[in-house]
C-alpha cells in the first residue's frame, strides 16, 4: 500500500470539528453542499467505525474529498471545493469538474493547499480506525485533521454496499437522495442487475474468468466487491481461490489454461497481454467471448448500469465452449 509523502508544516489557526463517541451508520464522501443543506448542523456516523461520529454546529458547506468520494457524491449534486487522491486518471476523475482545485494526486497531498481551501470537513476512504485517508501516514493525518475533521468512508462490500454509504453521506449533507434523477438512475442500475440475473439463469453453464493481465502475472478474484456482486447475480466465476490476506489470487501465464472459461473479462487496467501467444490461444479469446470489468469503477449508478448491461449482452451471446 503506497505511503503518503510528507509535506511542509501545517498552517495553524484553523480549528478542527468535534469527534464525538456515538452510534454508527453508513457513510462516505462529499463536496460543497451549502445550497442543499437543510439543517443547521452536520452529523455523520460512518458505518464500520463503531463509536465514531463527526459533528459540526453548522452545515458542511466547504468539502474536500478524494476523487472516488467526489465522483460518488456528484450524482447528488454535491461538488467539493477541492479533491485529492487516486482515481484522477480513471472513471472517478471523469466525474470531477476540471474547475475543482486539486490538492494532490495519487498519494501526494499539499497541506498548504488544503489549509487554503478552508474545508469544513474532509471525506474520503478511511483507514482501519477511521482517523484518516487510507493512504496517509500518521504525520499527514495529524496535519490534515488539524485543519478539518476527517469523515471516513469504509471501503468494502459490494457496490450496493458502497452506494448505500455514499447515500447516507449525501443525506448528512442535506441532499435530496430521493430526487427524480437519482431515483431514475437507481432504477436503471436495478434493472441492469435483473437483466444479468435473467441471462445467467438462462445459461447456468457459462463460466467466466475475471482477469487482470500483466506481462509476468495474471491476477484474478471472485471475492472483490464487484465480483462478489456478479456471483450473487448468478455468474459462474472460475479461477484459483485467493489467500487469507488478499482478495486477489495470482496465476502464471503457464497455468492459466488450468482454469478454462467460456468468457474472459479483461480488467480495464490490464497491460502487455494482447500479443502474448498464450492469451491468443485461450478458447474464450479465439471465440471472441470477451468482456470487461474494473474493481476501481466510480460508485455512480449510471456507470454500473452501463457496464452490467454490456456484460449481460456478452453472456447472452456466449456459447459453452469449454469441455
Image (tube, rainbow, N blue to C red):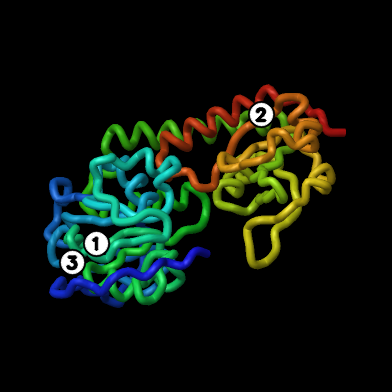
Frontmost of labels 2 and 1 is 1
Residue 315 bears which disc, if any?
2
Q: Residue shown at 32%/48% (left/top)?
A: 70
* C-alpha span from label 2 to label 1: 46 Å
Please state which of residues 315 and 12 is positioned toward the viewer in this rendering: 12
Res 256 → quadrant: top right
Q: Is residue 246 visible?
A: yes
Q: Residues within 10 Å of mark 3 (few under 14, many from 20)?
A: some
Q: Tag 1, which secondary structure?
A: helix
Looking at the image, which residue is at 40% across and 41% down? 300
Q: Which mark is residue 305?
A: none
Which residue sits at x=23%, y=60%?
A: 113
- Foreground residue, 181 or 178? 181
Tell me whether circle 2 and circle 3 mark residues in contact (CB < 8 Å): no
Q: What residue occupies the far right of the structure in this picture?
A: 323
- Pick the front one: 117 or 174: 117
**Is the residue 176 above or below the residue 181 in the image?**
below
Q: Is residue 182 above or below residue 88?
A: above
Going from N to C along the chain, the mark reached first, 2 or 3, is: 3
Label 1 CA crowd tier, 10 Å (few <14, some 14–19, many 20+) = many
* Local SS, label 2: helix
Residue 194 horizontal side relative to residue 286, left or right: left
Q: Which residue is mark 1?
A: 114
Q: Are marks 2 and 1 in contact (CB under 8 Å)?
A: no
Q: Which residue is mark 3?
A: 56
Q: Whole-percent x and y of residue 124?
A: 36, 59
Q: Quadrant of the C terminus?
A: top right
Image: 49 above or below 279: below
The mark nearer the N terminus, 1 or 3, is: 3
Marks 1 and 3 sit apart, C-alpha to C-alpha, by 19 Å
Crowdedness of circle 2 by 10 Å Cα count: few (<14), some, many (20+)?
many
Amino acid at each position: 500500500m503506497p505511503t503518503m509523502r510528507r509535506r511542509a508544516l501545517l498552517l495553524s489557526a484553523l480549528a478542527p470539528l468535534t469527534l464525538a463517541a456515538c452510534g454508527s451508520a453508513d457513510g462516505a464522501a462529499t463536496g460543497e453542499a451549502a445550497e442543499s443543506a437543510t439543517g443547521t448542523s452536520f452529523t455523520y456516523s460512518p458505518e464500520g467505525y463503531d463509536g465514531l461520529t463527526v459533528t459540526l454546529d453548522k452545515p458542511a458547506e466547504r468539502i474536500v474529498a478524494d476523487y472516488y468520494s467526489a465522483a460518488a457524491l456528484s450524482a447528488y449534486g454535491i461538488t467539493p471545493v477541492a479533491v485529492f487522491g487516486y482515481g484522477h486518471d480513471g472513471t472517478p476523475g471523469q466525474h470531477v469538474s476540471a474547475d475543482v482545485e486539486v490538492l494532490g494526486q495519487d498519494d501526494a497531498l499539499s497541506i498548504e493547499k488544503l489549509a487554503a481551501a478552508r474545508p469544513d470537513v474532509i471525506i474520503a476512504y478511511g483507514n482501519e480506525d477511521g482517523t484518516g485517508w487510507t493512504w496517509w501516514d500518521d504525520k499527514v493525518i495529524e496535519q490534515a485533521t488539524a485543519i478539518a475533521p476527517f469523515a471516513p468512508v469504509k471501503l468494502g462490500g459490494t457496490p450496493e454496499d458502497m452506494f448505500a454509504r455514499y447515500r447516507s453521506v449525501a443525506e448528512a449533507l442535506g441532499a435530496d437522495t430521493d430526487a427524480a434523477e437519482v431515483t431514475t438512475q437507481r432504477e436503471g442500475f436495478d434493472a441492469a442487475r435483473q437483466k444479468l440475473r435473467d441471462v445467467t439463469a438462462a445459461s447456468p453453464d457459462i463460466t467466466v474468468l475475471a482477469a487482470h493481465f500483466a506481462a509476468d502475472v495474471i491476477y484474478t478474484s471472485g471475492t472483490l466487491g464487484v465480483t462478489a456482486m456478479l456471483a450473487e447475480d448468478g455468474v459462474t466465476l472460475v479461477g484459483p481461490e485467493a489467500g487469507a490476506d488478499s482478495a486477489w489470487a495470482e496465476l502464471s501465464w503457464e497455468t492459466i489454461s488450468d482454469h478454462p472459461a467460456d468468457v474472459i473479462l479483461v480488467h480495464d487496467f490490464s497491460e502487455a497481454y494482447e500479443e502474448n501467444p498464450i492469451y491468443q490461444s485461450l478458447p474464450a479469446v479465439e471465440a471472441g467471448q470477451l468482456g470487461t470489468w474494473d474493481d476501481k469503477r466510480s460508485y455512480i449508478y449510471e456507470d454500473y448500469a452501463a457496464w452490467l448491461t454490456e456484460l449481460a449482452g456478452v453472456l447472452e451471446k456466449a456459447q459453452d465452449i469449454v469441455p
